[in-house]
Image (tube, rainbow, N blue to C red):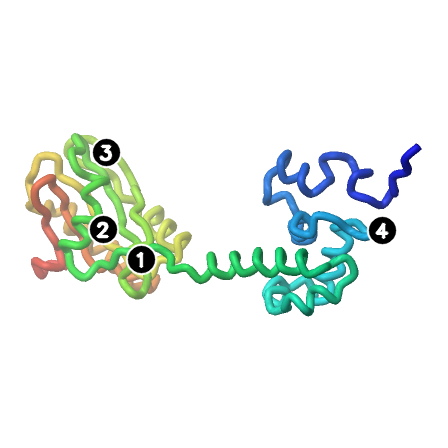
């Protein structure tokens, strides 16, 4: 008759074992100790792999950055951790470091009205109705994201200042550019366009989220309030 140590992982409910838990619930459901236990793969006579992982983590106050500083020799001092297991842990943490270190895709930067217009072409080209958008940017004028504010009819759409600045604040934007399209192709701003631009520019000044420009978009060209000196 075989005897199974009640403290081993094999005696746990299947959904509580690290490997099975990852398969059933996904990687995000696992604790740091459980993830390290998968690397360790086995414990000792009286400790599960999760127990060993917890001891290692406790030695660095559960700080993964400090754990990554441990050498193979340091890790091998823990009971149940031989050279092969130490190497597995070091390799996994190095992969994590390299992933973090890799450059993120560089954000597009707006240096002129043409840059802003080009950024919005995929969103506003061929639209048969008017839409109002904002292009949110950081302090370096790098694009955070375009946000659609409203959709209207052939000759107009609503631009609610409260909604516009709510979006800017939620996305931690430092500045913005306003956009709305004219399906007719007419590039001449209406008095309503001018009044709205003035109102939003003033609100941006008060909230320290400056409105840098307002572009009227058509499929073939655009009108920039800033370029035309009426901003």
Reading the chain from its start, which is encountered first: label 2 or label 3? Answer: 3
Q: Quick one: quadrant of the C terminus?
A: bottom left
Choose between 146 and 202: the one closer to the eye: 146
Choose between 135 and 205: the one closer to the eye: 135
- Secondary structure of residue under mark 1: loop
Left or right side of 94 for 183 = left
Reading the chain from its start, which is encountered first: label 4 or label 3? Answer: 4
Residue 124 visible? The answer is yes
Mark 3, residue position? 152
- Quarter of the image for residue 109 reads bottom left
Q: CA distance from mark 4 to mark 3?
A: 70 Å
Q: CA distance from mark 4 to mark 2?
A: 66 Å
- Secondary structure of residue under mark 4: loop
Q: CA distance from mark 2 to mark 1?
A: 23 Å
**Residue 153 percent across, percent down from the top left:** 20, 31
Mark closer to the observer (2, 1): 1
Q: Are marks 4 and 2 in contact (CB under 8 Å)?
A: no
**Residue 33 percent across, percent down from the top left:** 69, 53
Mark 2, residue position? 178
Reading the chain from its start, which is encountered first: label 1 or label 4? Answer: 4
Left or right side of 49 for 230 = left
Mark 4, residue position? 45
Q: Quick one: quadrant of the N terminus?
A: top right
Reading the chain from its start, which is encountered first: label 4 or label 2? Answer: 4
**Residue 26 percent across, percent down from the top left:** 59, 39
In the displayed structure, would residue 220 be above or below residue 108?
A: above
Left or right side of 118 for 167 = right
In the displayed structure, would residue 188 be above or below residue 25?
A: below
């Amino acid at each position: 008759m075989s005897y199974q140590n009640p403290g081993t992982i094999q005696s746990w409910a299947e959904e509580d074992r690290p490997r099975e838990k990852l398969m059933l619930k996904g990687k995000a459901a696992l604790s740091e100790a459980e993830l390290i236990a998968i690397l360790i793969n086995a414990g000792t006579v009286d400790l599960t792999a999760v127990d060993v992982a917890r001891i290692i983590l406790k030695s660095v106050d559960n700080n993964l950055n400090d754990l990554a500083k441990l050498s193979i020799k340091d890790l091998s001092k823990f009971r149940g951790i031989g050279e092969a297991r130490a190497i597995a842990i070091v390799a996994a943490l190095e992969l994590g470091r390299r992933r973090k270190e890799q450059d993120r895709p560089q954000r597009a930067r707006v240096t002129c009205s043409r840059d802003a217009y080009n950024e919005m072409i995929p969103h506003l080209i061929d639209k048969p109705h008017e839409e109002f958008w904002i292009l949110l940017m950081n302090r370096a004028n790098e694009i955070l994201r375009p946000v659609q504010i409203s959709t209207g009819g052939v000759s107009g759409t609503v631009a609610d200042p409260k909604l516009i600045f709510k979006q800017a604040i939620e996305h931690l934007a430092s500045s913005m550019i306003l956009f709305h399209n004219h399906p007719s192709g007419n590039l001449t701003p209406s008095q309503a366009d001018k009044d709205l631009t003035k109102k939003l520019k003033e609100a941006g000044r008060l909230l320290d989220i400056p409105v840098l420009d307002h572009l009227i978009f058509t499929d073939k060209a655009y009108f920039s309030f800033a370029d035309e000196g009426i901003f």
